[in-house]
Structures are given as C-alpha cells and as structure tokens.
Image: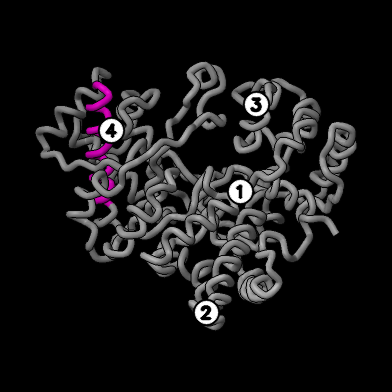
C-alpha cells in the first residue's frame, strides 16, 4: 500500500487515539466540499476547458510548487511561470520530477501524492528517470472526457466553490454557470478590491479612474469612488457573491472624516503619498469596507501580513503571485479596534480574520473571536495550511474561543486538482485533534462527532451565509 492510500495517513500514531480519529473521520469523509475562498477561474468551468498538459495543470500555476524548485536554482521561466512563458511543457515537467525529493515532508508533497493516486490513479513516484513516462500517462488521462473540469467538479463532490474577482469583472462566466441547467454546482464570485484601495498597487490611479467612470453614478472624486465601490458590491451580490475579501498589507483600520478622506484620496490619485499615508488610506478604506458589509450583508474576510512581491527583479519579470510573497508580523488587537468599536457587535455582520503570523493565534485572534459576535477565526492559510500548522492553530485557539467561532476550511488554491486533497487533509487534522481530546477525557466521543460535522460542513455554511 502506498502512503497516499494508507487510511491512517495524518492520524495519530498511538493506536487507541488513532481508532477514535478514524471513527470521527468517517463522520465527515464523504461530506461535500464547501470552498468559500479560492482562485479557480470560473471560465474554465463555464467552457469545460480541457487541461492542456501535466505541467500547466500541476506545476506552473501552483506557486507552492514553483517557489521551492526555484529555491533549488531552477529559473522560474524554466517552470512555465510568467506571461508568455515559452518553455516546453515536457521540459517543465522534467524539472518538477527531478525536484520531487525536495517536497518530502512538505504540505505540497502530501497534496501532490494524493492527487497522483486518487485523481490520476498513479502509484509510481515522480523521478527524473520516470518523468517522460509519467508525462505521457497523465497527458493521456487528460484527453479522457472524465478529466474535464466539470466532471472533476462532480467527482470531487464540490457543492460550493468561490472564485476571487476584480471589482470591474463583468462576471459573465458566473452568470453563464448559474443559467446552465447542465452544470450541477454553485460557483460564486468574491469581491476583491485590493487594486482599488492600495495606493501603491500598480496602476492604482488608472484603476480608480475606470472604477469611478463605470460605476460612480456620474459623481467625481472621493464621493464617486465610494459610490462606485458600493455599486459594484451590489452587482456582485446580484451575481451570487457572499463575501468580500481583502488581501491588505496589515489589519490596520482607521476612521477618517470626509474632509480628511477626500484629501488623502486626491493625494493617492496623484501618486504622491508616503508609505504612512498609503497605509492610512488603506486602513480607512478597510473601515469603509466593513461599513459597507454591515449595510449590504457581504461577509468580510481579511488576509493580512504578506509582504507582496518581495523580490523586485522577479516581480518586474514574472509579475505577482509567483512565489515570493513573504509573511511578516501583524498587530490585530490595536489595528482592528476602530473597526470593531463601531461594527464588532453589529447585527448579522460576519468578519473572518486570517493571518500568516501564527503568534497571534492565542494572543489576539482567539480572544477577539471569543468576545465579538462579528468575529470568526479564519482557517490556517497559505504557509500555515499544513498538517502541523493546522494542529498548532487548533491547539492555540480552542481553549479560548472553542469550536463555534471557526469559519471552516479554505483551500485558497489555483491548483484545481488539489482541492479534494486539501480538504481531506483538514478533515483528518480535525479528527486527530478531537480524538486527542476524547482520549484525554476532555470531551465525549459523541460531542466530538457533533463538533467535527459542524467544523467541516455547518460552520462554513453558517459563517459565509451559504
């Protein structure tokens, strides 16, 4: 039996605790996947676009994979990364197979093993010697109608899948999927306004101009800007959106009066803001996004703490989301206070807080979620969406916030075929953690069975208003 098929993978090593964990896992193993945050392209599902080749499916779009190979000395352009990449897919695949030993012990290695075995039916490990044979085998699988995106969506048992979308996207793909009786599933857009509220984002002034002209109801300046954001949020809601996501630099929030906000907005449009003024404008707009969520009902999610595009040369050549976004420490307790002071107890406001800084799990996030009705704990995300980090998260937050303040798992992926493996990982980790509490007589096994169903299924439906 391969390790990817072992029924005890990721479960506790002690036999008695493992037996409890396996019993708990059985409660949720076949439940549908609820994916309220991710980066899959809705057009792919609308048009049922075949996957072109193994490299384009499993390597090039997955910065979890490419960053580690790049760290070993392989240039990103040899991995098919960046606009207009011309490296032959088979060459990309050979680099990946040669680098396979690098993934031992990593979350990426675990997911990939699961994909190879459970999606493609492969038991042979990638290797430099086997690269071409594996490429040909997977390529043949991809020509089978059973490996088209819509069939995989069904086979993966995905019930809800959220995409991440620019505020000015026409959402035609979402409308097409919603109107297609042949597509059985729910694909919802997510309002992601980062490029329109971060004054140092590339093209910020042009983005704002297009936004105001298209949705500002004829208004200009800051008033037209705010109106346009409100209007586009309503457009997203009309197309099925349930949340607005904010990949801000920090969780800082700031409540400015209109005169201050207008002045800062005009400086930002001119491009003469300092770093401090940029942060102040983004902080004010994060407060405004919360105000809008209270009014229109969109769940608000915050993903701070990433130093985006850390290596200037890589960003200039290959663009964003190419593996060099690096975490840094954040301050939630002070930063989020202005927002929570006004909206933390607002009726039906749901605020899901994520972090890349796990030092805030027990010190800040759990206490915040343990008091404010609006606050929910986002799952371990990105560098923390790995088995041991998931266990650290659950251990750090549960004694203060319990289980009811959790928002459920997110896969946060561009790699479509990794979705079931990621959700399976989360379910096994939840079963393992709960089994330990049962074995230590801290909760009952019946209570643990109820909790794991809630964590996997009811919590994401409840928190994301699905």
- Residue 242: image quadrant is bottom left
- Place of residue 290 in the rendered image (x, y in percent of width and height, measured from the top left): 27, 50
Report how far apart the C-alphas of labels 2 and 3 lie in the structure. Answer: 47 Å
Within 10 Å of disc 1 (Cα), the crowding (few <14, some 14-19, many 20+) is many
Q: Which residue is mark 2?
A: 441
Viewer-closest of 401 and 345: 401
Say if the magenta span includes residue 279.
Answer: yes
Q: Dots 2 and 4: beta carbons under 8 Å?
A: no
Q: How many marks?
A: 4
Compared to residue 353, the image places residue 200 above or below, namely: above
Residue 212 is marked as 4
Q: Is residue 370 visible?
A: yes
Q: Dots 2 and 3: beta carbons under 8 Å?
A: no
Q: Of the residues tagged 2 and 3, which is closer to the observer?
A: 2
The secondary structure type at the circle numbered 4 is helix
Q: Dots 1 and 2: beta carbons under 8 Å?
A: no
Return the disc, 4 or 1, that comes first in the chain's sequence: 1
For the N terminus, which image quadrant? Answer: bottom right
Residue 117 is marked as none
The secondary structure type at the circle numbered 3 is helix
Report how far apart the C-alphas of labels 1 and 2 lie in the structure. Answer: 49 Å
What residue is rendered at 79% in x and 53% in y?
A: 117
Report how far apart the C-alphas of labels 1 and 3 lie in the structure. Answer: 33 Å
Q: Which residue is mark 3?
A: 70
User: Magenta stretch?
Assistant: 274-292
What residue is rendered at 56% in x and 31% in y?
A: 323
Q: Which residue is mark 1?
A: 46
Report how far apart the C-alphas of labels 4 and 3 lie in the structure. Answer: 40 Å
Q: Of the residues tagged 4 and 3, which is closer to the observer?
A: 3
């Amino acid at each position: 039996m391969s390790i990817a098929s072992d029924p005890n993978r990721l479960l506790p090593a002690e036999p008695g605790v493992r037996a409890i964990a396996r019993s708990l896992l059985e409660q949720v193993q076949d439940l549908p996947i609820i994916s309220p945050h991710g980066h899959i392209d809705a057009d792919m599902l609308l048009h049922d676009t075949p996957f072109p080749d193994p490299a384009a499916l499993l390597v090039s779009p997955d910065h979890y994979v490419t960053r580690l190979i790049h760290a070993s000395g392989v240039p990103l352009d040899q991995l098919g990364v960046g606009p207009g990449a011309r490296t032959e897919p088979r060459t990309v695949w050979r680099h990946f197979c040669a680098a396979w030993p690098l993934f031992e012990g990593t979350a990426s290695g675990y997911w990939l093993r699961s994909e190879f075995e459970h999606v493609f039916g492969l038991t042979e490990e990638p290797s430099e010697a086997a690269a071409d044979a594996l490429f040909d085998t997977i390529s043949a699988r991809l020509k089978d109608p059973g490996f088209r995106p819509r069939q995989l969506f069904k086979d993966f048992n995905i019930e809800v899948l959220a995409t991440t979308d620019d505020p000015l996207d026409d959402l035609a793909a979402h409308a097409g999927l919603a109107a297609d009786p042949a597509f059985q599933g729910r694909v919802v857009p997510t309002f992601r306004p980062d490029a329109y509220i971060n004054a140092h984002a590339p093209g910020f002034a042009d983005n704002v101009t297009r936004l105001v002209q298209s949705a500002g109801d004829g208004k200009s300046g800051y008033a037209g800007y705010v109106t346009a954001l409100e209007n586009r949020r309503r457009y997203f809601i009309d197309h099925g959106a349930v949340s607005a996501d904010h990949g801000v630099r920090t969780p800082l929030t700031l409540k400015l009066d209109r005169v201050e906000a207008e002045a800062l907005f005009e400086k930002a449009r001119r491009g003469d803001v300092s770093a401090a003024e940029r942060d102040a404008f983004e902080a004010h707009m994060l407060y405004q996004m919360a105000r809008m969520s209270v009014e229109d009902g969109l769940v608000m999610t915050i993903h701070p703490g990433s130093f985006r595009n850390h290596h200037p040369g890589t960003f200039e050549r290959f663009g964003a989301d190419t593996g060099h976004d690096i975490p840094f420490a954040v301050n939630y307790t002070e930063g989020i206070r202005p927002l929570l002071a006004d909206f933390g107890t607002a009726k039906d406001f749901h605020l899901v807080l994520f972090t890349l800084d796990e030092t805030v799990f027990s010190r800040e996030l759990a206490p915040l979620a343990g008091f404010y009705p609006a606050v929910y704990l986002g799952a371990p995300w990105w560098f923390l969406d790995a088995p041991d980090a998931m266990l650290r998260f659950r251990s750090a937050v549960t004694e203060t916030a319990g289980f009811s303040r959790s928002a459920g798992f997110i896969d946060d992926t561009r790699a479509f075929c990794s979705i079931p493996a990621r959700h399976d990982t989360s379910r096994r980790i939840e079963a393992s953690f709960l089994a330990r509490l049962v074995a230590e007589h801290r909760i009952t096994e019946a209570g643990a069975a109820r909790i794991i169903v809630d964590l996997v299924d009811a919590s994401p439906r409840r928190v994301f208003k699905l």
